[in-house]
Image: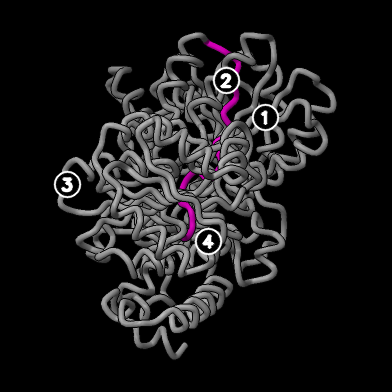
């Protein structure tokens, strides 16, 4: 790492010759591989753009020139070259540097990102606002499948020549690319001259770099883009995972690498296996994903039922609306989307699914706190934004067994349904597993109704915390019990009506505003009874939730077992 140790900022990079820049690329790859294998992170995507980012900093003058990294999961080289080399070992750790660009972290990061397909829209705005600066957007071929990218391209043709768009073409999203875009890019690669003529006719310039790991070729292309009088597309062919053979051979596995090894099956695996089993028995079941077949556990379904598996690319809104069309045609669609990405399809959930009362099941993966990725990926908003929707039911299984039971139950449910569950292995939660009945919570009536304090826990992470907190209270002689409030909507009003003036506490894997706890409190307030329980609501306050492990974040937000036990002791 002799060269990298001399790079404290882009000015040092500009002093290097090409031979030294290749040595720098080797150093950067070594640090990225060792850091990610030790602590987790995005590996393949970063290894594929090392030379591209080096060339960007060599040609342009960041931070005066603005660099936008689509999604942001390929910004590690950028961080190493912009003064964060010595803290790079804290990547994605609690209190460390983010795995995505963060304006609060460095003046070299101009946009906070974490979701796909936003870079071109940001670039259009910055190009208009900062005509004196060069705006450089680095976008992967997978992100081009998102509708927002097409909207930005439609607008981009009206801009001037201060915009360079680098398309990193490695023929992969997280999973293999699907649909129209891969074919278009293949056509561009096969005949760049014809492609350039076509794009120039539309109002864009075009440059193709066949070897995206040639720093000389990249530098020449980026310098040529500076001379353009209109937005310029620099199309670069790269190898995802370049320089690390395991990642080159299996770029999907190493896209988001975790160094931890689970002893059991994760929620996603349980979901995917169960849905595939149900599809064996019910030929109307379809599985839909937005470029996340592996991450959502649907790779099993895809192999077993390829004719009923639909990957729409990075297009969550289309996934939901298309699934509404499947439901109108008499099919039973299950749409598996991470909680943080379901936000992108909110209008479709309301307008196209709920208003029509269609039997679309949203399988909301990565709900609650998500380790490592930080504020852009925390799944803490879905209870609130789903509870308020007409005809929507929200079901939060506490463990893998209940997730399987929820899917089994959902087959005959004929209305909009969201089943939400966190990332990782299900917690070992004790207690009953009563059959799932619409709106009914899971609890031991004798235990709960004899307790002095009742804790209503909504969500798998909250159930695990509640269990530990109740045990801690017992050690202090405090008689508390928890209820698995598996339906966030509707509430189990039959249970709530059984409770007299004892103290009720709620805890949920989401924000308090508009959430489960506020709904419980509102229910009692609306009864206008002279005697109703006092309700204490525990959840995430209005704000941003930091990067770190699940336990780190829960402790920071006082949602860990010790803090909850202290609250129950009051």
Instruction: Calculate the distance from the C-alpha at mark 2 to the C-alpha at mark 4.
Output: 36 Å
SS at mark 4? loop
- Residue 189 appears left or right of 347: right
Query: Which dot, 3 or 1, sits closer to the camera?
Result: 3
> What are the residue bounds of the magenta stretch?
357-372
Is residue 127 a member of the stretch shown in magenta? Answer: no
Circles 1 and 2: CB atoms closer than 8 Å: yes
Is residue 371 a member of the stretch shown in magenta? Answer: yes
The numbered mark at residue 322 is 2
Q: Tell me, yes or no, if residue 445 can be seen here.
A: no
Query: Which dot, 2 or 3, sits closer to the camera?
Result: 3
| 89, above or below 358, in the image | below
Q: Tell me, yes or no, if residue 307 can be seen here.
A: yes
Residue 93 at x, y percent in the picture: 43, 68
The numbered mark at residue 131 is 3
Q: Which residue is under mark 1?
A: 310
Instruction: Calculate the distance from the C-alpha at mark 4 to the C-alpha at mark 1.
Output: 31 Å
Mark 1 neighbour class, 10 Å CA radius: few under 14, some 14 to 19, many 20 or more: many
> Residue shown at 62%/42% (left/top)?
186
Depth order, front residue of 363/470: 363
SS at mark 3? loop
SS at mark 1? strand
Query: Which dot, 4 or 1, sits closer to the camera?
Result: 4
Residue 172 at x, y percent in the picture: 61, 49
| 77, above or below 130, in the image | below
């Amino acid at each position: 790492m002799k060269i990298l140790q001399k790079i404290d900022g882009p000015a040092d990079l500009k002093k290097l010759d090409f031979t030294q820049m290749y040595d720098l690329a080797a150093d950067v790859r070594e640090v990225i591989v060792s850091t990610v294998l030790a602590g987790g992170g995005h590996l393949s995507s970063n290894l594929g753009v090392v030379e591209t980012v080096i060339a960007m900093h060599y040609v342009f003058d960041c931070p005066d020139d603005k660099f936008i990294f689509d999604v942001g999961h390929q910004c590690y080289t950028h961080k190493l070259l912009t003064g964060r080399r010595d803290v790079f070992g804290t990547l994605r750790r609690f209190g460390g540097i983010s795995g995505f660009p963060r304006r609060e972290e460095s003046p070299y990061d101009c946009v906070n990102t974490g979701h796909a397909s936003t870079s071109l829209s940001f670039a259009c705005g910055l190009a208009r606002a900062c005509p004196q600066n060069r705006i450089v957007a680095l976008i992967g071929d997978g992100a081009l499948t998102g509708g927002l990218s097409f909207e930005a391209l439609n607008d981009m043709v009206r801009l001037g020549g201060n915009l360079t768009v680098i398309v990193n073409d490695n023929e992969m999203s997280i999973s293999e690319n699907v649909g129209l875009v891969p074919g278009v890019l293949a056509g561009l690669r096969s005949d760049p001259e014809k492609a350039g003529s076509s794009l120039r006719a539309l109002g864009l310039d075009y440059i193709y770099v066949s070897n995206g790991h040639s720093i000389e070729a990249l530098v020449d292309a980026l310098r040529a883009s500076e001379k353009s009088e209109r937005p310029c597309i620099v199309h670069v062919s790269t190898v995802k995972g370049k320089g690390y053979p395991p990642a080159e051979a299996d770029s999907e596995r190493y896209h988001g690498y975790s160094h931890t090894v689970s002893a059991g099956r994760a929620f996603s695996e349980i979901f995917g296996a169960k849905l595939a089993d149900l599809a064996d028995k019910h030929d109307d079941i379809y599985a839909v994903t937005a470029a996340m077949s592996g991450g959502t556990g649907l790779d099993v379904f895809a192999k077993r039922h390829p004719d009923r598996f639909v990957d729409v690319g990075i297009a969550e809104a289309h996934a939901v609306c298309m699934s509404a069309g499947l439901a109108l045609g008499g099919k039973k669609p299950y749409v598996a989307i991470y909680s943080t990405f379901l936000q992108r399809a909110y209008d479709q959930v309301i307008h196209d699914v709920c208003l029509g009362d269609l039997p679309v099941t949203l399988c909301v993966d990565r709900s609650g706190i998500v380790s490592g990725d930080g504020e852009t990926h925390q799944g803490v908003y879905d209870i609130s934004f789903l509870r308020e929707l007409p005809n929507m039911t929200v079901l939060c299984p506490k463990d893998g067994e209940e997730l399987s039971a929820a899917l089994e139950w959902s087959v005959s449910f004929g209305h909009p349904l969201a089943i939400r569950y966190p990332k990782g292995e299900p917690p070992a939660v004790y207690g009953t597993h009563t059959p799932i009945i619409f709106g009914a919570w899971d609890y031991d009536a004798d235990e709960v109704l004899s307790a002095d304090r009742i804790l209503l826990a909504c969500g798998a992470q909250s159930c695990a915390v509640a269990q530990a907190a109740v045990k801690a209270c017992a050690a202090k002689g405090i008689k508390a019990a928890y209820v698995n409030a598996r339906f966030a909507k509707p509430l189990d009003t039959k249970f709530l009506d059984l409770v007299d003036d004892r103290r009720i506490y709620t805890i949920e894997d989401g924000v308090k505003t508009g959430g489960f706890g506020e709904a419980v409190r509102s229910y009692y307030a609306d009864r206008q009874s002279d005697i109703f329980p006092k309700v204490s609501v525990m959840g995430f306050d209005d704000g941003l939730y930091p990067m770190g492990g699940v336990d780190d974040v829960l402790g920071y937000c006082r949602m860990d077992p010790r803090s909850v036990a202290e609250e129950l002791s009051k």
